[in-house]
Every structure is written in C-alpha cells, then in structure tokens.
Amino acid sequence: MKVYKTPEIKNISLLGSKGSGKTTLAEAMLYECGVIKRRGTIDAKNTVSDYFPVEKEYGSSVFSTVFYAEFLNKKLNVIDCPGADDFVGNAITALNVTDTGVILVDSQYGVEVGTQNIFRTCTELEKPVIFALNQLDGEKADYDNVIEQMREVFGPKIVPIQYPLSCGPSFNAMIDVLLMKKYSWGPDGGVPTIEDIPADQMEKAQELHRALVEAAAENDESLMEKFFETEHLTEDEMREGIRKGLISQSIYPVFCVSALKDMGVRRMMEFLGNVVPFCNEMPAPVTTDGTEVKPDANGPVSIYMYKTTVEPHIGEVSYFKVMSGTLKSGADLDNVTRGSKERLAQLYCTCGQIKTPVDELQAGDLGATVKLKDVRTGNTLNEKGCEYSFDFIKYPAPKYQRAVRPVTEADSEKLMQILTRMHEEDPTWIIEQSRELKQTILSGQGEFHLRTLKWRVENNDKLPIIFEEPRIPYRETITKAARADYRHKKQSGGSGQFGEVHLIIEPYTEGMPAPDTYRFGNQEYKMSVRDTQEIPLQWGGKLVVNNCIVGGAIDTRFIPAIVKGLMDCMETGPITGSYARDVRVCIYDGKMHPVDSNEISFRLAGRNAFKEAFNNAAPKVLEPVYDVEVMVPGDVMGDVMSDLQGRRAIIMGMNSVKGFEVINAKVPLKEMASYSTALSSITGGRSSFTLKFSGYELVPGDIQDKLHKEYLENAKED
C-alpha cells in the first residue's frame, strides 16, 4: 500500500440517527473505491462495518468501525459510527480524531432528535458538516419537506448541492447544481449516466446554482469581488470557496444518495476527495499544557490511542492517530500516560476486521497495531525526548445505571476484569465498586447500552450475570438541636473501661456563628469553644466538632477518640443506615477515670451519646436530585410531562428549540431508574435527555417512613 503524505489525508466521521443507513453507505463507498468486490447487507450479516457477534445479533452498529478508501490519489479515513444515542461515545471519539462529519438524514423521517444531537456535537467541536439525504427511494421520502425542515433547524447555512427529480421508489435521477449536470441510474445503481440538464429543470437549477455560488464566494474576499463583477465562479473557484466555508462552518452542503441502490455515492465521494479539507488544513489540537501540535510529518513522533477493541482470533487491537511525525513499524515509543515503553512491531490500516500491513504512517493518518503490553484508551505514546500529552475527548455523563453481580459469587473477580476491559473499548461504560451501596454499579447511556454489555459478557465471555436496580445513596441529617450523654463502664477483672461524654448536636450550615448558649427544658447550657475541627466528608457535607470542655473534665488526648466515635455514627444513620452529613457537635462535659479511661472507652461513649442525640434531633432523609433536560417532539410533550410529574418531578421551565420542545425539571434519582426505557416507549425513540447531579433534598414524610421500615426489616434479616 502506498504511503500517503499528510497533505493527501482526509479524516471523516460517518454519522446520523439509528436506521439512517450509515453501514449501507459505508458498503457502497468501499465498493465504489474497489476495496470490496461485492456489497454486503445488514440482513445477510456480511457488511464490513458490523462484524462483531453482538452487531450481527442486533442487526445494527454497536461499535465504530474504521475503514479507508484510496480515491482520487488521496486517502480517505472514514469512521462509521453507531446511530443509537446509547452509543454516542463512539461518535464523540470519532469526531475528536477526524476533521469532517458526514451526517446522514433519512429522507422519510427528516431531522430526528439524534440528528440534532450529533449536529450539536459537531458544532461544539467546530467540525465541518456535510449532510447526505439518504433513502430517497423510500416510500415516504420527501426531499422538499426535509430541506425546509433542515433550514428551520440548522439555519440558512444549508445549501443543496443536488436535488432529486422524483422521490420514492421512482427515484433514479438528480440534478447536480455544482457541476450543472443531470445524473441518472439504472435499476441497479452503480455507474451513472451524466447528461445536460433538461430544459424544464434549467430555471430551478440555475437558481440553486446562484445560491451555491454566493455561499461559496462569501468565504473569500477575492471570490466575493469576482462574484459581484460577473455573478459567476469557475468550478475550481467554487470548490475553494466551499472548502473555506466548511473549515469556518459557514456552509453545510447537502447531497442526495440512495446507499442501498448505490445511487449518488460516487459523486459524493468525489466531493469528499476534491473539496473536503485535508487534515493539515484544520485547527491543530493542543496538548494538556496548551501546546498546539500541527500534523507535521517532520516533527517528533507522537500518537494518541483513541480506541481499543478485543477482536476474534487477534486479541487486543489498539487504534491510534498519528498526531506528529512519521511513525514506522518497529518503533520504540514511551507511554507518557503510564510511564512504560512499547514497541509497535507492526502497523496496519484497517477496513473493519481486514488489516493491511503498512511500513509507515505520516502525521494526521489513522492506524492500528496489536498486542501492546500496557496501553489504554486515551494514552499518548511519544518518541524519546518528546513531551506531548493529549487528553481532548470529553464524554457525556451517564444516564442509566444498574447494579451488576455474577450468578456465582466466586466469579466476582473475573467479572471485574471483563468490565474493566470493556470500559477500555467504550469509555462511556463506567464501573464503580460502591463501598457505600455495597454493590458494583454499572453506568451507561441507556438501557440498550447496558443490555448490550450484558449480552457480550454472557455470550462472548460465557459468564452469566444479574442486573438489579441500584440502591440509592441517601443521606441523613438533623433538623433541630438535641442533647445526650452516655457513660461507658466495663469491669471484668484487672483494668476496666470508663468514659463519659456529654454533647449537644445541631444542624450545620456554612458560615453559621460559633455556639454560645443552648436551652433544653428549663436548663441552660453555656458553651466556651476551646477548639474547632471541620471535617469535610467524602460523601458531601461536613461534621464540625467543637471542644467546649472546661476544667479538665475530659483530657484533651481523648478528644480524637470521641471524634472517631462520632464518625462511626456518621457512616451509619439511624433511619436508613445511610451516610449522615451537616452536623455540628459541641462536646461540653464528661468524666474520666485515672486508671480505667482509655481511647476505646471514649470512642464508645462518644458513639452512643451521638446516636441518642441524633435520634432526638428530628432526623430526616435526604435524596439525590438531578437536573433533567428532555428534548421531545411537540406532539408527545403532554405525555412526557405527565410521566415526569408521576416521578415527583418539579418542572423548572419549558422552551422550544428548532422544532423540538425542551423540558427542564428536577427529578429524584430514585424515580429515574427506568426513565430511559420509559421515555423511548412514550416517544417511539424520538427523544433524548441529559441529567446532571443537582443536590440533596428532603424526601416526603411517607417515603421516609417507608424507607425506615425497609431498613429495619433488612436489619432483622441480617
């Protein structure tokens, strides 16, 4: 295989909603380039992209697939990304290592929520976008309506390059207003017939051509001057103007294709080869210390590992982008992230599971290698003396959680090894062994996302696992002041144990004044604070301890032991056994024995005094509440609102965003356990949501009583 230079390389992400036809388009692109001799189909389970067993089982993409095409003496690296929102991490990874996004739009359904979400990601990352209207041969295809919808959602930057002469099963011809030619195909697609534009289409074609020329000219002053003078640009001038418009995201060209029938695919690839920016024409990435690294083949060798998979008969495959320099097979590199050394014995260019050995890859290119010793997704590998380190991929917060455990407890360690490996393959699968909840919590982007992981563990690794609803990390606190004292006394021959602690507790808020006087019944207690400890709690909030001992009733050396006793109780609240937070304690009196007092005595005395006071301080349960943003079509907004209100949601506001309704609400985490599945069911998969931790709030009294009852019953069983 030819070694392509940096100015000959283009990196492209293939994006779109689930079912928009990306995998089918990838097959047509590979066929047009001669990489494959026959196009596979999803039904036949023989496509280049969907080659993992789980993808063949589901009939849809689960992982991104890297392939390359040698076309017009250029190398097009393309990453075909899954369309389901559950696998958005693959698309985010792809967009971060490529330079242009091709977004497929199903001409039968128009702009879907998934289309908007991926477009938003492209604009946030400042990537050029090209739209391809696919499935124009579908029964419900409506080109004019979709273009109107796209302009409403994406704005006036939408500029058609082509339009079809008819939609639906009769689709077989279109007008290209860049080249001003008519393209038509036989029933099997493939090589088009190229003709002059018919007279009855000339007026419409010229109008769209003028709009395209104006859009291209706007991106270059000299082209704009020529346009004002002649109202005409040459084909090369238009290409240059469009390329600059793509780089500045001021133009979104729209193409027409039928991926299934291979109509319009080659023409779109010509545009990708001739017009889309090269990798060295895009803004350069920056290192973690802010250094800009341009793709220079003569610079120091630095590669970024953006993807890891475990493939049948091969093992671990590491995918990378050459950020700088020229990487040669057999290179010895330093892993700056993990502090280890690696030898890249063999380099490959990949087309799905087909791997073509290459001798070298220049800056900007995408490649793969196998069987590295100690490399993880996100690592940077450099030649000796190079200090580059990259960490530019940011993933969305998880939306769905399940507790996971093996059917056989003895397989717990094996399960953790598998889950760790799978997190490397998809960083949006997040694994946490929660000491608080005593569960292994698996988080992801949706129910389908986690169900896919379960399928792979059970079918590929032959390890049966169980999904359960995760416990909720409740918190406990107090709502009024309370006083208690406790004497711990134990005598059993020899030296005994003795410690007595008197304390007052109250709710703590940031910035509250130092304690002065408390009154309980007819008795008044004056405080004289000698020392204050503010203990930030790992689980949020604080424990503040004031030493108010006077007259040496308790020796200062026993105060740390009392604090340990307080912390014992803070880790196990009396209502649900959850962590407690935001409590201030004043230790104001007590007694000690010159022989029998020791640390364990005061720890137990402090623990029991605190427990009694906590129970008398009107304890309350707090629950985690999340900010939830739901994007839905207007026709189902009422159903979505009703469902949210049934989940104890507080609606914070609503607004419209480009054809969709956005609902903002605060919802308890307990009510979000099955929301991903429920929302998909209510809206037919036409919606999406995000959630972000907001804070802890008091649970209603009836729910607190229920939680306390459940806690007592479980404690009895234990």
Image (spheres, rainbow, N blue to C red):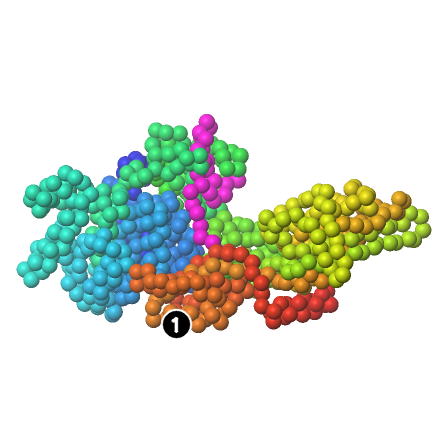
**Place of residue 638 in the rendered image (x, y in percent of width and height, measured from the top left):** 39, 72
Q: Which type of secondary structure does the marked residue at label 1 adopt?
A: helix
**Furthest-right residue in view?**
493
Q: Residue at x 72, y 68 (%)?
A: 717
Q: Nearer the viewer, residue 153 or 416?
A: 153
**Place of residue 8 in the rendered image (x, y in percent of width and height, measured from the top left):** 27, 38
Q: Pick the quarter of the image with the C terminus.
A: bottom right
Please tell me in which quadrant of the rendered image residue 241 appears: top left
In the image, residue 393 lies in the stretch drawn in magenta: yes
In the image, residue 410 lies in the stretch drawn in magenta: no
Q: Main secondary structure of the magenta part?
A: loop
**Place of residue 23 in the rendered image (x, y in percent of width and height, measured from the top left):** 34, 57
**Place of residue 409 in the rendered image (x, y in percent of width and height, measured from the top left):** 65, 59
Q: Which residues are magenta?
A: 373-398
Q: Nearer the viewer, residue 672 or 502?
A: 502
Check disc 1 and give the amino acid type: Gly
Is 698 situated left or right of 682 in this image? Answer: right
Q: Which residue is mark 1?
A: 638
Q: Residue at x 38, y 52 (%)?
A: 91
Is 580 situated left or right of 459 in this image? Answer: right
Q: Residue at x 34, y 68 (%)?
A: 634
Viewer can see residue 706: yes
